[in-house]
Image: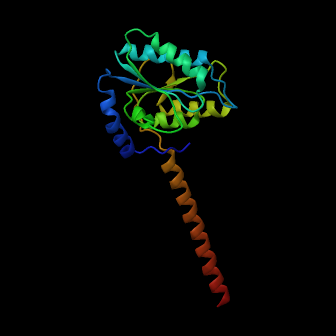
Amino acid sequence: PPHRLTEDRLERSRTEIAPRLKDLPRPYVTCLVGGSSKHVSFTPDDARSLIDGARALAAERGGSLLVTTSRRTGEACTTALVEALGGMAHCPYWLHGWQPEGDNPYLGMLASADAVVVSADSASMCAEACAVGRPVFLHEPKAGAPEKFEILHRRLRACGCLRPLGSAWFEVETPPPNPAFAIAEAIRRILMQRSAVIDAEQVASTASAS
C-alpha cells in the first residue's frame, strides 16, 4: 500500500522528538502495536509476546524500546503491554498510548528507529515500517493473519526489509520500498499512452474528413 512518508517528513519528525528520547540508550527498537479487526484477532497474550520479542531484540544490543499503540489496540491489550513493560529488567522504554486527539509522536518514533517491530494486523503499518530503511521484525498473532496480508509479508521479505520477530538483527541492503511513487509513475504512463491514442485518432479523423 502507498504511504505518506518522505525523507524530509521523517527528518522533521526525528528532530522534533529527539529531546524526548535523549535519556534513552540506543539502539531504539520502535514497536508499532495494532489490534484486532474483522480479519485478525490480536489478544493480550499477543501483546505480551510482541513485547517479549522486542525486549530480547533491544537487550541484545543494550538498547531501548519505543512503544506506541493504535486505535485498535484496546484496553485489555494496552493493559497487557503496560504489565509486560513494567516487568522488564534492565530494558528502558517509552510508551505512548494512542489517543484520538492531541500529541501523536508516531512518525517521530518511526523516524528515530534503529529497528522496528510491527504487528501483522495492519498492511499500512508494515509498509510504513519498511519505508524507513531499517530492519523490520514482524510479530504474527497466535491466530495468524489473512492470506492477503501474508502475500504482502512475503513480498516485503523478498525485498530484504522484513523478517519474523525472533530472527537475528540484520542490515537492510536494498532501498526502502516507495509504492506511492511507483503508483504515480504507472498512472502517468497510462495517461501518456491514452493521450497518444487520442492524438492518433484525431489525426486519422482529420485526414478522413479532408
Answer with left or right where residue 85 lies relative to residue 206. left
Answer with left or right where residue 152 lies relative to residue 176. right
Q: Count every numbered label the image shows and give the total.
A: 0
Q: Is residue 169 visible?
A: yes
Residue 90 lies, in percent from the top left, at 37, 10
Residue, x 44% and y 10% (percent of image)? 88
- Quadrant housing the C terminus: bottom right
Q: Looking at the image, which residue sits at the far front?
A: 102
Residue 34 lies, in percent from the top left, at 57, 28
Q: Quadrant of residue 107?
A: top left
Answer with left or right where residue 92 lies relative to residue 50. left
Residue, x 60% and y 15% (percent of image)? 45
Q: Nearer the viewer, residue 52 or 170?
A: 52
Residue 7 lies, in percent from the top left, at 38, 43
Q: Nearer the viewer, residue 18 or 186?
A: 18
- Quadrant housing the N terminus: top right
Q: Is residue 52 visible?
A: no
Q: Is residue 83 above or below residue 188?
A: above
